[in-house]
Amino acid sequence: MSNQIISAENNITRKDFWKTFWRSFTLLNSFNFERMEGLGYLYAIMPELKKIYKDDEEKLKAAYHRHLEAFNMTIAPAPFVMGISIAMEEQAKDDPDFDTSSINAVKVSLMGPLSGIGDTFFWGIFRVIACSIGVSFAKQGNVLAPFIMLFLFNTPAFLTRWYGLNLGYRSGSKILDEFQKSGKMQLFTYCAGIVGVMAVGCMVASQINIVSPLAFSIAGQKIIIQDYLDQIMPKLLPLLVTVGVYAAIKKHINVTKIIASIVVIGFILGVFGIVGMGA
């Protein structure tokens, strides 16, 4: 592991940043409803704080208390905020007039926009795509399916954590200010949302195979219901089921009840030959 110097004044090295990188995975380990991810956040940046305030125990304690404050955001981009906090703590040490309350103010101001981006990409796009590809391999009986899914999801997450930490330390606040003032943040989030919806739509169409085997004859002509449904809209039944489940979730119906309802309704409709699973 490289011991390259990142901050000569405080002897912060790349090894310290690697410690913060790995510790960032504990953000949710100590989640509570009072401080949420606050304890994990402090634990992650402790290696740098100890070096910054190595000669002043009182200021070190004050820094610990600062970063125990409530913090909550999507995990992957959180190290970006950590990098900014480390840089601001270095400024606080060097400037006696520095307003230390601004450190938490910056953290709070970043929770919303970065969570919006993080949720859109990691929960709305990367997770859906990774699970979709993983399920496709699993349906073929490939034993590597779960590893493929984990690799596809975690690769962008790992890269975002590491490079976000470094970018946040060097120029994070400046970049975000420019994004906010130029309006690019809203455009970026909007476009990412479109990509996320497209990914969900593709997964519904490719992975939910619900068809109607109903068929009957009129005047000697065989009528197949699924053919008419496909003419109205291909994959109409999977779409209706997905929209129905989504509506139930929006109404805060218990997920266990939703799953049980799907099993019972699916069983009844299958027994009577009304719906079935497609090829």
Image: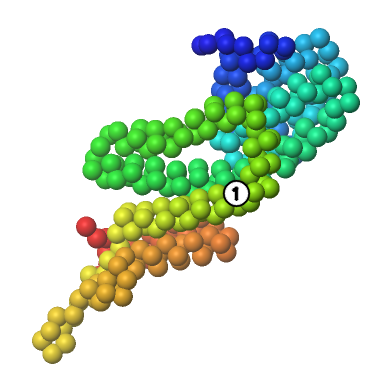
Q: Quadrant of residue 254?
A: bottom right
Secondary structure beneath dot 1 equals helix
Q: In the rendered image of this protein, does residue 34 appear above or below residue 181? A: above
Q: Hey, which residue is sitting farthest right in the picture?
A: 97
Circle 1 is placed at which residue position?
A: 184
Q: Left or right of 13: which side holds 234?
A: left
Q: For this rendering, which residue is in front, 13 or 226?
A: 13
Q: In the rendered image of this protein, does residue 82 appear above or below residue 140? A: above
What residue is shown at x 45% (from left), y 66% (from top)? 244
What residue is shown at x 39% (from left), y 36% (from top)? 152
Residue 14 position, x and y percent, is 58, 15
Q: Hey, which residue is sitting farthest left in the picture?
A: 220
Residue 115 position, x and y percent, is 61, 44
Residue 229 position, x and y percent, is 28, 74
Does residue 60 appear in the picture of this structure?
A: yes
Q: Quadrant of the C terminus?
A: bottom left
What residue is shown at x 29% (from left), y 59% (from top)? 209
Q: In the rendered image of this protein, does residue 45 appear above or below residue 154? A: above
The image shows a total of numbered marks equal to: 1
Q: Amino acid at mark 1?
A: Lys
Q: Quadrant of residue 43?
A: top right
Q: In the rendered image of this protein, does residue 181 appear above or below residue 16? A: below
What residue is shown at x 45% (from left), y 65% (from top)? 243
Residue 168 position, x and y percent, is 63, 30
Q: For this rendering, which residue is in front, 89 or 148?
A: 89
Q: Hey, which residue is sitting farthest bottom in the picture?
A: 219
Q: Left or right of 132: which side holds 72?
A: right
Structural crowding at the residue carrying mark 1, measured as other residues with C-alpha within 10 Å and reported as few (<14), some (14–19) or many (≥20): few
